[in-house]
Image (spheres, helix red, strand yellow):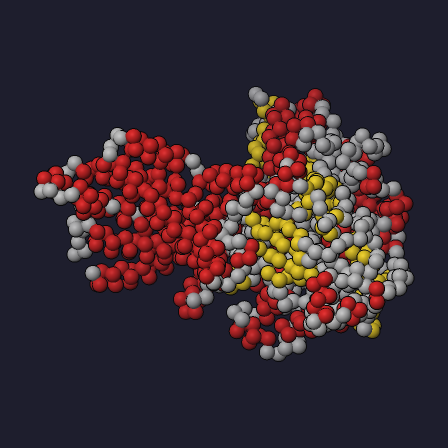
Amino acid sequence: MARFIVTRLLWMIPSLLVISFLAFVLIQLPPGDFVTTYIATLASSNEVVDQAAAAALRERFGLDQPMLVQYLKWVWNIVTAGDFGMSFEWQQPVQGLIWERMALTLILTFSTLIVTWGIALPIGVFSAVKKYSIGDYIATFFSFVGLAVPSFLLALVLMYVAVVEFGQEVGGLFSEEYVQAPWSWGRVVDLMHHLWIPVIILAVSGTASLIRVMRANMLDELSKPYVTTARAKGLSEFRLLLKYPVRVALNPFISTLAWLLPNLISGSIIVAIVLNLPTAGPLLLQSLMAQDMYLAGAFVLLICALTLIGSLLSDILLALADPRIRLE
Amino acid sequence: MAPTDKRTPNLPAAWSLNRRRFIQGAAGVAALSALPSSFTFAQSAAKEAPDLAKLVAEGKLPPLAQRLPESPDVVQVKQVGRYGGALRRGLRGSADHNGILKVIGPQNLVRWNVEFTGVVPNLAHKWEVSADATQFTFYLRKGLKWSDGKPFTADDIVFSIEDCAKNADLYKATPSQIVIGGKPVVCEKVDETTVKFTFAAPYALFLENLATPLGQHTTLFAKHYCSQFHPKYNPKVDEQAKAAGQSDWPAYFRSKCGDIEIPSRWGNPDRPTMDPWIIKEPYTGGATRVVAVRNPFFWQVDQQGNQLPYIDQVTYSISQDVESLMLDVVGGKIDYQDRHINTLSNKPTLSQNTKRGDYRLVELIAANAQQVQIHLNILHKDPKMRAMFGNKEFRKALSLGIDRKEIIELVYLGQSVPYQTSPRPGHPWYHEKLANQFTEFDPAQANAILDKLGYKKAGNFRTHPDGSKVFFAIDVIPTLYPDQVDVLELVKRYWADIGIEIKVNTIERALYYTRGDNNDHDAASWSGSGGLDLMFDPRDYFAYHPQGSRYAIPWALWFTSGGKSGEEPPESQKKRFALYDQARGTTDLQKRAEYVKQMLDLTYEAFETVGICLGVNTFGVCRNNLQNVPDKMPDSWSYPNPSPTLPAQYFFKA
């Protein structure tokens, strides 16, 4: 097991390099660069930027060099000094911009994950065991509604109702007094007060599909001979369910853990924008639009790294959860 | 036809300037010496905000008399206000620093009067201009102080210009506002409160330029603070820059002292300013809120001697999404806002909710001449297209083929009139022939012209003389101008009726610019500037702007590069450029109007861009308890509304 983990960790290094290169190329692909976007903004407020000034700007940002050189410099600084470069737009080191956002994103992502699983798994098990009961139909009905409503729409409707009907504010993750405050117990509590809204919104659609997956998997397992055998041997119904069918039915959940992380980050961008959440998504989108490539690159790289770590985790968990899987 | 009220539904009476008033005003450079402040200010009677009075009592702040200049700027406010409250506004997540600038900055030697017709004293209480408009002497108010209490003197201005704006490491090219005839200004200190600017050639527009946001280099940098990031005053600055994680000293300097138009101007709470409010919670990447608090050393008072600003602080919430900003407005969480929400499509929602949000709408007078302007690329790379677009008769046919009245009814709810780009009706430079030529809807004549030019119909659509199909694309940015997409869809229908097939090419902003920069576009749409502020933005009257004059970008490049790149323009363009230069260089306003008229005559003859209708006025929302906000104000970047209406004298009714 230890050897497996070490090998996988080592493989991550070349993977990350390839990913970082692809990310860099992708960010560069759209026409123009940061200076184009910047000049476009200036030009719409009728400022004239002549070509010499534009060239000077490109030189200042290092945009006049070939892409490969820009890429190598970027990676070199990350590897040797942990320096992710400067954000063009904010004239601030990228590190300062991403960490808190990434931390909040992870908090949001994991809260959503826990809530989603917490709701989806019991309901999925329930509706498989009580197939075609009233409860199953109700769960099925709501899960289809949840699947059909886009989460950003849900967020907008929720905000509208809150503002117009109740005069309440729903955006953001913190109250006024804690927005810029350093971390403290009060701030954590404040975060908890705000976190449940985006978590519920994001969990709704995820829960719905997971209920269906769980239900289908369970139905497969419930009819298998080992269940009948166990039941015949007098195992209590509850223990029987948890001991084998549920454990086996969890397999697809664990193996998709790796995709959940990037999914929850990218899938929540629109919700985060609508709800004005200080998470990574909106800043990533913004930096892509401004072609602020070091900032965007750092985000993409981090999300990719998370995916790699996630897939390692899911492999380890699978080996632990499913007796049929062996590492050798 | 003379401009009448019927033709100008959007123009309030106050804006129908007559020529005389304009000459006193808009081009008001003639004011060789502004009125000296004859008002002797009784400092003992001065009053201040309670929180400041408390600090004074505790000995943490000098008394008001020591904080105010000897002759503060006395603002004649409509209602004397009361202290307190927070002005709540909204910013967009990214690159919205000008949303801060337009309220808090720009504080310069002079500022626009509220009407946008001329400049009035600001940090300088008077000035003198030499007869040939090459020398400008400014007299600063005595005893002005930066927001940290240090004196503001001529040294600061000389530092800002000589050491910073003219520094080749900091600014690769000296900002064009202080360059004339290829030579940058020379700025000298006469005494503590007097500075002299000397230009190599007449620069009659210098005062007006100082009143625009881009003219702010003079007062941007406090010497006592910013010199520590400058190698001339701090030899160790490069090491310090590296230690701070910056690549070199200019980057370090910018991150600490900012520049006119970059976010980091609002990212350092320690930077001393002359603004009414100073940044407390900075605008940095990822910030969700920006807060600016009262500057205890602010140098304006009302007519009763109360120190301004009345309002304690300005709070900006940062929304990623315009819809959530709209919700804030409707929910009454915004006190004053025009940016981002003032689109025509938002107006019904905002009008319906005035009660719920307890706000009123304020009218913003468009400085634009044109709501939608179609730039056909006269210098197209394809010779066939170039011949087509380059032909004035062809452009005339296209213009006659547009039903402007229907567009105005359908897209602009009747709130505009058919118009070609010209100064707005009521402006002294209004050019009737230019404004109205080829705006009638006459498909028969359009067809006849196209037939005559040899663009024969084959089926429904026409072909070039060589038999290939006539087809082109018009680039438009849907996220920036959603209304223009609707207009162009209608234009597509009208032109299909006269046999011209087009594609409405909706593209993203950077691509739009890249295509323009490479001269790869067939045609492009944009709004048209120069309705009220022609002298600042003549890009639609001749090829002046290398990114903006999209009908002939190579000509603009030729002008800006002094003939080194681009393509040599025709005589008419060169004459217009020369006339503009002459207008810019003369203090004689009669003469300036004459030059501009000649220039507009040439624009009229050349007929290069196809305009649709007069720029439509927009609006802002203002909470009902916020007072001293004018009901109408110009909406322009050169007049960075609402700043010239002095937000420092806004206040909240009890």
- Decide if residue B19 is on the left or right side of residue A267: right
- Decide if residue A92 is on the left or right side of residue B123: left
Asked whether the viewer can see residue B644, the reply is no
Observer-nearest of B405 and A170: A170
Report the quarter where the N terminus of chain B lies: top right
Q: Where is residue A173 shown, x and y percent of the image?
A: 49, 52
Residue projecting furthest to the bottom: B235
Query: Residue visible at 52% across and 73% down?
Result: B243
Query: Residue visible at 84% across and 66% down?
Result: B43
Observer-nearest of B378 and A117: A117
Q: Where is residue A19 shown, x and y percent of the image?
A: 37, 55
- The image quarter containing residue A60 is bottom right
* Label tally: 0
Q: Where is residue B164 shown, x and y percent of the image?
A: 68, 68
Q: Where is residue A187 shown, x and y percent of the image?
A: 48, 59
Query: Residue visible at 89% across and 59% down?
Result: B35
- Decide if residue A276 is on the left or right side of residue B535: left
Residue B502, above or below B199: above
Residue A128, above or below A7: above
Observer-nearest of B610 and B123: B123
Asked whether the viewer can see residue B630, the reply is yes
- Decide if residue B36 is on the left or right side of residue B484: right
- The image quarter containing residue A24 is bottom left
Query: Residue visible at 85% across and 52% down?
Result: B28
